[in-house]
Structures are given as C-alpha cells and as structure tokens.
Image (cartoon, helix red, strand yellow):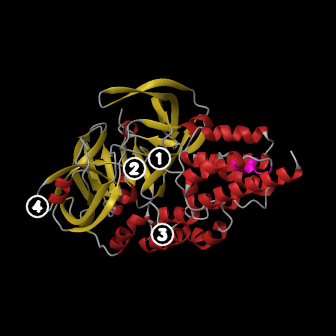
Amino acid sequence: MTLLLWHTLSAQSIQTVDQAKAALSKMQYGKALQLLQSDTATGVITGQEAIYLEGEINLMLGKDLFLKNLQQLDSLGADTHADILRAKYALFIGVDSADEIISRLLQKYPENSELPYCQWLLALKQGRYSYCKSSAADVSENLIFPFAPYLALYNVAWDNNFDDAISYLDSIEMQVGSFYESKYRKLIKLQQNIQVESSSDELLELPYAQCGPGMGILLTDSRGDTIKMELDTGTGYSWMTIHDSASGSNLPGKDTLTIKNGISYNYMNHPRDFHFKLTDFKKPFYENLLVGYFNGRFSKADGCFSPFFFPHHAIQFDPLNEKVYFRTASNLAKYKKQYQGRITSVPYVIRNGWIFIPCKVNQKTVLMMVETGSRDVNFNRLAATYLDLPVYDGFVRWRGKDYPTKKVDCTIEIGEELIYEVKGGLVNDFVLGNHYYGLASAGDLGPDFFKNYVFTIDPFNREIIFEQPKH
C-alpha cells in the first residue's frame, strides 16, 4: 500500500466514524450501525473506535452481539474501550458494584468523558435529583449521546415535576429534533393543571379480579358502571389505559385530548390513536382522573393501570385471599406497626412510573423491574451471561401454540427474608429500558412471584412491603 493510499483510506475511515457519531447524537441508531459496519469504518486508525461504538449500540439494545464486540476489543488490546464498556455493562443491569467499578476506572482514566456520565447516572439512581439537574449540561457536553442526561431526567421528571418534564423535552428536541416522546408534549401540559380529589377514608376495600395470570380490581365509575382493570406495574407514566374504544368512550366525562398514533403494545401490528378524558369514579371515590383509551384487544381485562394512578393511596394486594385495599399514608403507617416482624420493606427506584428493586441472583445484586403485567421471571440475555446463569432450551405457550425460547432456573433473594426459586424463567433479548436513560435492569419479576405474598406498593416511602403468609 502506498503512503498516499494509506492516508486516503485513513481519512475515509475517520470521516465514516465521525458520521456514525453524528448519527448517534441524533438517535439515528440504524444509520450509525450501517456506517460502523461498512468497510471504510474498520481502518487501522478507526477500527477499535468503530467496534466500541457498535458495542455501545448493541448494549443499549440488549443484544448478544455486544459480547462479540467486547471480545474483539480484547483481542485488539483495546483495554480502555473494553474497560469502559464493561463498566456500562454493569450499569446496564443495575449491578450494585457499578459504583466501585466506575470509581476505580475514573482514577485509571481521568480524562475519559463517558465515565463521569456513568457516575452521574448512579447519583440519579440514588435520588440526587437536584444535583443531577444542575450538572446535566456539564456531563452532556462531551458525550457520544449528548441528549442522554436530559432523557434520563425527563424519565425521572414524570414522577416529580411536569414543568421539568417539558423543559427536558425542549432540551432533547434542540439536539435531536422531534422524537418518540415529543407526541406527549400536550399530554404533559394537560397534566400540569389537573387537581385530583379523592375519598378522605383512610382504608378502602375494592373487589379483587383475576386477570389471566395477573391480578386486578373492579372499579365503579360515577354512573355506577363497572370495569375490570389489571394491575400492571409495567404501565409507564402512571397511566390507566382502557384497551377498547367503546368501553373508553362510555366512561363519564368528555374527551380532552387525542394523540395520533400515540400508543403501541406488543400485540399490535401498528400504533393506535390515543384518547384521554377526565373522569370520576364512585369506588374508589376519585375525581378528575385522566384516563387513556384506544382501539386495542385485551382479553384478560378491560385495560390496565399503574399503581401510581391513584395518587393519594398505597395499593395493597392479597392474592391468596383475593383482597385489595387502598391505604392512605397514615393508615399504612398503622399497618406497618401492627405487622412489624412479619413484613419486609424493600426500597425501589422509580423511573417514568416503572419500579426497580434490588435482587440477589447467583451472589450478585442487580436491579429487577417489577412487572405484574408479565408472567413469571424474565432475564435479558446479557444479564443471564453476566450472572453466570445456565440457560437451556424450552418452550413458551402463547395463543395455543408452543414457541421455542431459552429458559433458566435460579434462586432470587430479596431483602433479608424473601427467597424465590425460579423454575423455567424466560431469557430473551427484550429490554424495556437501558442504562443510558437511567432505566437499567437485569429483567423483571412477574405476577407468579407476587402472588405468593400480600404486597403493598408504597408511594409515600418508595418501597414495596411484603407480608409473609401465615403458615
């Protein structure tokens, strides 16, 4: 190769990698991957960086290819790139040693611009919201994904301050233009001014409802009509959604907003228009609740709701005795005092209405998402590898057919008292969130786990309370 040709190829590879970085900064992941996997991206000068960037994308998406990227970097002696990706791997599943790993690497690579953001994400996980707000611009400045801190703060703001959520939406759009969350701008502005009223009763009992593998309640609207709603902690944004246009339009109240193609579920072949109305309920007594509905298909209930949809109460489920209670903060305090010695309280991290709790698996503590709208226990593939879990072939039955899948058996420990034996837990590529937006987790805990306990989702102290059943 002549010197001139070498310089030409090097210039082309640098340009291609720079184009990939520009695409990543705009959330254009497909375009970035295409550029990084092209021949011009893998030159002598840029090969390591191209593999590193490809690894970033595969990690965000929870793909097994990430492990191949790590092996490639190790074989090339790219220690810095490999070390940074391994730190982000720990962040990806919320491993408790991530703080120690990142602090050690900050000492080793003090000039690296990605590690301070990793540390910033841990601060956000710890609830240091004010600090993260004030330092977002500094950590964003030299990131591969400069919009990421604002997207992480946006996810947290849904649970804290709608004014902040609008502000972070502005910040993201200034960098990437309109994106998938932009459609919710009018919804956030609508929620800014809603004043919810509720019953003054400290303890309310509601009818329990079986919802396929899950559990739910029967709600009575202000006209006396009943709807069956599944508790689905995977319902983001603290929503309640009715998956049937007729049932939704029949609710009392007037439609206040329609978002074109505003919602999509995994059973849909395309997004549906999302309608919202302010409605009142008689049981439990609540006024001015914003309910969403759309033309969907949900056979196990009329729809599903977040445990944070009823903002003035903690929701307690007793699946063994088919009881549901709504408790105020003062009543919940009395319950905790009365059942002291029989309950285990586990603090949770909340992002965008999703709940994550620490779980010990194979002697490693990771974050697991609470997902009562799922089935049993699910791990993403990268988490299963990190946790050294033996994976075997199996099947899952859906709509009367068997589908091949990967399964795992393991023990999960939660808090000081709870031990759960997983038999045939699922392992797949599905990742609800990712580390870069503060939504890291190793997988999720489904209703089969929660049906073993009386459990309370306590929004006042941000913890889940498990009551051991009587023997």
Q: Is disc 4 placed on a helix, strand or loop?
A: loop
User: For the residue marked with disc 2, what is the amino acid?
Assistant: Gly
Disc 4: CA contacts within 10 A as few (<14), some (14-19) or many (>=20): few
Q: Nearer the viewer, mark 1 or mark 3?
A: 3
Instruction: Read off the residue under disc 1.
Output: 369
Vertical placement of residue 416 versus 293, above or below = above
Residue 169 is tagged as 3
Task: Judge by depth and name the residue closer to the eye, 324 or 47.
Answer: 47
Image quadrant in which you'd find residue 437:
bottom right
User: For the residue marked with disc 4, what is the amino acid?
Assistant: Arg
Q: Is disc 1 placed on a helix, strand or loop?
A: strand
**Count of labels in the image:** 4
Vertical placement of residue 407 versus 465, above or below = above
Earlier-in-chain disc, 3 versus 4: 3
Residue occupying the far top of the picture: 393
Earlier-in-chain disc, 1 versus 3: 3
Disc 2: CA contacts within 10 A as few (<14), some (14-19) or many (>=20): many
Instruction: Read off the residue under disc 4.
Output: 223
Please provide the residue range marked out in magenta.
45-50
Image quadrant in which you'd find residue 136:
bottom right
Earlier-in-chain disc, 4 versus 1: 4
Residue at 43% over, 54% down: 354
